[in-house]
Image (cartoon, grey):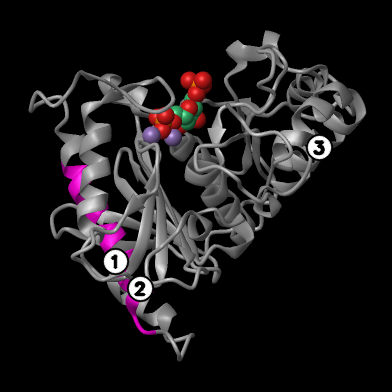
Amino acid sequence: MARIVTIERHILEQQKQFPKATGAFTQVLYDMALSAKIIARETTRAGLVGILGETDDQNVYGEQQQKLDIFADQTIFKMNDHTGRLCAMASEEHEDMIEIPAHFDSGKYVLLYDPLDGSSNIDVNVSVGTIFAIHRKISSGERGTLADLLQPGRSLAAAGYVTYGSSTMMVYTTGQGVHGFTLDPSVGEFLLSHENIRVPATAKYYSANQGNEKYWTPGMRRYAKWLQGIEGEGRKPLGHRYIGSLVADFHRNLLRGGVFFYPGDLHEAGKPYGKMRLMFEAQAMAFLAEQAGAYASDGIGDILDIQPYSLHQRVPLIVGNRDLVEKAEEYIRKYDQEWVEAYRPFREGVREQA
Ligand code: AHG
Ligand code: MN
Ligand code: MN
């Protein structure tokens, strides 16, 4: 029988590499694992308990919130508000920074999360996920500020995701490789199943919502043709797989090799920045990608280097095998100067997104 390592033990082992660690940070990760179990319990019986269906509320993006979005959001908040380990939180489902209630202690970290990613897939029994990212507090006051949340991905202390698929898995990094744990529902524990994940050198898949192709820039359209082996050096085509849940698409490509892209485009005036959220989706995935030997770009450069200016800012995302992502950057440099000029001010914070 193989060695059995629970996520708790694994996190503690990793902590030993940092003799000065207080354990607060490891506990935040462990609380994420516990939140994940609770959310998994609800997603797996979503069809049974009448929790399905949309509420009348819309989130800050004008999208309809699913009930499970709210449930997942509250679960993560309630798990973390009173522990004294965080000084602030931010969630895709909340317009503003979430403060730690005044009657609870404030801590040294901030947590950013997309409580339920791919939520439009719930009603049709397709994989969804949770994404999280942890930064260290940098401001000097007692309580957390927006500045603690708006740090570049390069400063992340940890990031990860949970995928609620055919089984529930939690995958995380603290900058010491990427490790995956599968939930054994019979014992209620996440067990180490994928140690030190490295993206395979040869990619199998590309993933994009190709229904949007007519809106893509000339460079991205050519890039898709290149992935299909139509344009360029006559390479073997990659398979096309797209779930519409970033977590699930990313996870598959991480294990099998591939590239996911949700590019920016020019079809809506003044919005060249695409759909993915920098703080709740892209940063975490970029950190995981780098730790697994892959790469994430917004088409111009590394996602991890972007200095954020708004919690809900959006960003183009191209993530996967480094050679494939760099190829996209090359196509963009060559054919998409108009788009680059429109997008760059948003990347640099010279213009702010509406
Ligand atoms: P969320 O459910 O958190 O709003 O995220 C949905 C995101 C992401 O998971 C996915 O990759 C993408 O939206 C799919 O968008 P399209 O439906 O436009 O392809
Ligand atoms: Mn999402
Ligand atoms: Mn979401």
Which of the two labelled residues, at mark 1 and mark 3, occupies the earlier sequence position? 1
For label 2, the crowd category at 10 Å Cα-Cα, with few meaning under 14, some 14 to 19 and many 20 or more, is many
Image quadrant where one finds the C terminus: top right
Residue at position x 27%, y 42% from top?
73
**Whether residue 290 is situated above or below residue 341 in the rendered picture:** below
- Quadrant in which residue 64 is drawn: top left
Residue 310, horizontal then vertical, whole percent? 55, 42
- State which tag comes first along the sequence, 3 or 2: 2
Which residue is rendered at x = 61% and y = 30% of the image?
A: 353
Q: Which portion, as a residue range, is magenta?
A: 22-41
Q: Are marks 3 and 2 in contact (CB under 8 Å)?
A: no
Separation of residues labelled 1 and 3 (CA atoms): 37 Å
Badges 1 and 2: C-beta atoms under 8 Å apart? Answer: yes
Quarter of the image for the N terminus: give it. bottom left
Give the labeled residue for mark 3: 329
Numbered disc 3: secondary structure: helix
Instruction: Name the residue carrying label 1.
Output: 30
Q: Which residue is mark 2?
A: 26
Residue 277 counted in the magenta span: no
Task: Give the x, y percent position of residue 317.
Answer: 63, 36
Q: Measure the alpha-carbon separation of dots 1 and 2.
A: 6 Å
Apparent side of residue 314 relative to residue 192 in the rendered image (left or right): right
Q: Does residue 268 sit above or below 83 in this rendering?
A: above
Q: Which amino acid, by three-letter code, is at mark 3? A: Glu
